[in-house]
Amino acid sequence: VSEKTNQKMTYTVAVVDEGLLDITRFKTPDPWNRFYAREALGVKTWDLFDNVMGAFGGSIERLLAVGGDMEAKAKDDDARANRFKPVVKFFGPFTLSGGSNTHKFIMPQYVGSVRTMVVAGYEGAYGKEEKATPVRKPLMVLATLPRVLGPEETLKLPITLFTQEKSIHNVKIDVKTTGPLTVTSGASQTVSMSAGGDMTVNFDMAVKSATGKATVEVTASSGNFKATDVIEIEVRNPNTPVTKTTESVLEAAKSWSSDVVPFGISGTNSAVLEVSNMPPIDMGSRLRYLIHYPYGCIEQTTSSVFPQLYLDQVKVLTETEKNTIQRNVTAGIERLKSFMTRDNGFSYWPGYESSDAWGSSYAGHFLIEAEAKGYYVPADMLKRWKKYQKNKALEWRRNDSYYNSDLMQAYRLYTLSLAGAPEVSSMNRLREMSSLSPNASWTLAAAYAKAGQPEAAKKLIANLSMKITPYREMGYTYGSDLRDRALILETLSLLNDRTKGFQILKEISSALSNYGYWMSTQEVAYCLKAVTAFAGAEKRGDLKFSYTINGKSVSATVNKPIAQIQLPIQGTQKLAVKIQNESSGILYARVIAEGTPARGQEEDAESNLGLSVRYTDTDGREIDVTRLEQGTEFMAEVTINHPGVRGTYENLALAQVFPSGWEINNLRLTGDENFAASSAFTYQDIRDDRVYTFFNLGALSRVTYRVMLTASYAGTYYLPAVSCEAMYDKSIYVRKKGYTVEVVKPAGVQ
């Protein structure tokens, strides 16, 4: 690196994979043009651009920019495979006073081209320079695998060799694997190739009946020349995890034994022994349900982390659990930033222009509680949210066409009171309304309690019934009678009414502990939040018990209402568990086992929804996908129809998970979305091996969604079930079972 006229300068050097730069259309930064650009006129202007663009909600608002300055950087555990490791090197800053500098570094295993970018400046002078450089060695090797793999699949591993030396003729290839992946055709081959050419060699591979991270290390050698390529890949099971629970009520001095038999494939099994002196709430499995729920709207994002704020009140946390909770909550706060809208509320999906009323209150409620627990919440984020809430509270007018219109306002006012900014005039106006619903009255009472007016709160609910008429919403407040009972419990906790609160606690506990009882994410989160806050404030004495696992006994004394012991599941081996009550009162004990079953065990099913799937070529002709030639481009077409038994279905989720050997062609990246044009949807999430589509569906109407695919990798794979469900109503769902598919090489190709 040198300066043209030998002047002093300070500079940085970046070396980046050109493929990445091409995807983001990244240009080398030009500081001179940036800092010496013309200044804009000092006048204010207005336009209606956002409103005009909003009219194209079916397509324009869905366009996503690729990149984002590390905003979406993966925060997963190191145990997950890092499938694609880009070349990104950054050096500096360095200062040069005449002459030149030389920088040396070790290039990671890579075949391709990199761009070296130098950006410099000193005392008002700025400059930049770039150069593209091919990366090559005399002998190079490149192995290729799908983005993910599934258990019990077979495939071919294509390995491409490149030579730059005429002396290289015979090349030995060795393949080593770790994890649930094996080579079935022999781990070594020797091939002859022409000088200065390239060739592809295939190895047969098989995936075990297990999940986890696998690595493939390919080494090519010829004389003194050697090249290595290492691939990390995730073996995932696309099936839904299953939870099984066994439980017992232990009187003083009584014991209970249970055998834990893993039922999922290896790598997916886990089990927890949960002991409590309060009615059981199945906290372990319910919390895992929230954390692993596959979608990510504002309600589900908030629900996944909200109850974790209160776990320390009901159970003793290990260091690992504390770190996990801190990481999850911090990530939740960070993700909520992507939902903020121009009016300072939160949208239902990231990037939406309009805010979601209940979601805004719910997310703000979480942020307030998180800040109170010591988490960092940006001050500007809360300031903007409070402004939004106050404006909406003042603008609100009752709308009887919505079931929970007054509850929406009451909850908004409650969150403002929690934030230390009670809107008392709006609270008084709501209280004076005739025919205020019971759930709104209970929530408004909580607002008064947090605003420092407990007498007004008690007067409001003095003669109020705790019974809520059964109902279920698919949108708006995402509510149900069970969720509203949790709201009542929260109010009773604030008013320190332990007697009535315990009655509600038993009702909620009964639902939480009944794993056969389906609950939405909103129900689970709010119930866990209310129960843990109520139980954490009650002193019920220490838990005293002993437990034996495969003959090894441990005595335990816990000063929290709930104790959880992680059981050491090893593969698929049975585990014998025994628990002895050493307390003077009743203990509730349960073993919660979770595992993901092997493929092919799902069945067709439907309830109040219809679904059909067909596969076509690019001209729309139907094809059979059980056997496809490698390189075939085709479309998956799913049609969902509303049978008309009920009104509009809101917040439906279509889940399409594709075989490992098929690649999704994300047409957003090429601007060819119209080629596979589908019905309008509210949001679509395209991932490595699956597409989630979210939409509403009117009575007696139907929608069709298409995904462009390519049969890329030869082998035998499993096509998982296609399913569609209402996210907040379990009575609306449909599923088409999966089957085995094959990708074969074209005729005449080895």
Image (spheres, grey):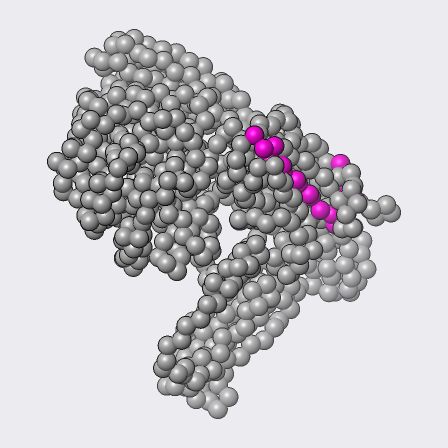
Q: Is residue 150 magenta?
A: no
In the figure, is residue 194 to the left or right of 658?
right
**Above or below, comparing residue 668 to residue 507 in the picture:** below
Q: Given the current orientation, which residue lies at the most extreme front position?
A: 434
Compare residues 85 and 224 and report the one nearer the observer.
85
Which residue extends farthest right? Answer: 748
Task: Confirm whether the magenta stretch covers residue 630.
Answer: yes
Secondary structure mainly formed by the magenta segment: strand
Which of 679/531 is in front?
679
- Rendering coords of residue 424 (x, y %): 19, 48
On screen, residue 339 above or below 427: below
Give the x, y percent position of residue 311. 30, 34
Q: Residue 432, image x and y in percent?
A: 21, 40
Q: Residue at x 53, y 49 (%)?
A: 683
Q: Residue at x 87, y 47 (%)?
A: 748
Tell me what residue is drawn at x 31 percent, y 29 percent: 485
Rendered residue at 53%/79% (across/down): 129
> Can the viewer see residue 199 in this picture?
yes
Number of disc labels: 0
Magenta stretch bounds: 626-645
| Identity of the residue furthest to the bottom in this view | 5
385 versus 8 height, above or below: above
**Residue 328 picture quarter:** top left
The percent coordinates of residue 197 (x first, y second) are 78, 61
Place residue 208 in its image quadrant: top right
Please name whichever residue, 627 or 306, is drawn nearer the observer in this view of the structure: 306
Quadrant of the image occupied by residue 408: top left
Residue 203 shows in this picture: no
Horizontal arrangement in the rendering, residue 709 relative to residue 45 (left or right): right
Q: Nearer the viewer, residue 338 or 501?
A: 501
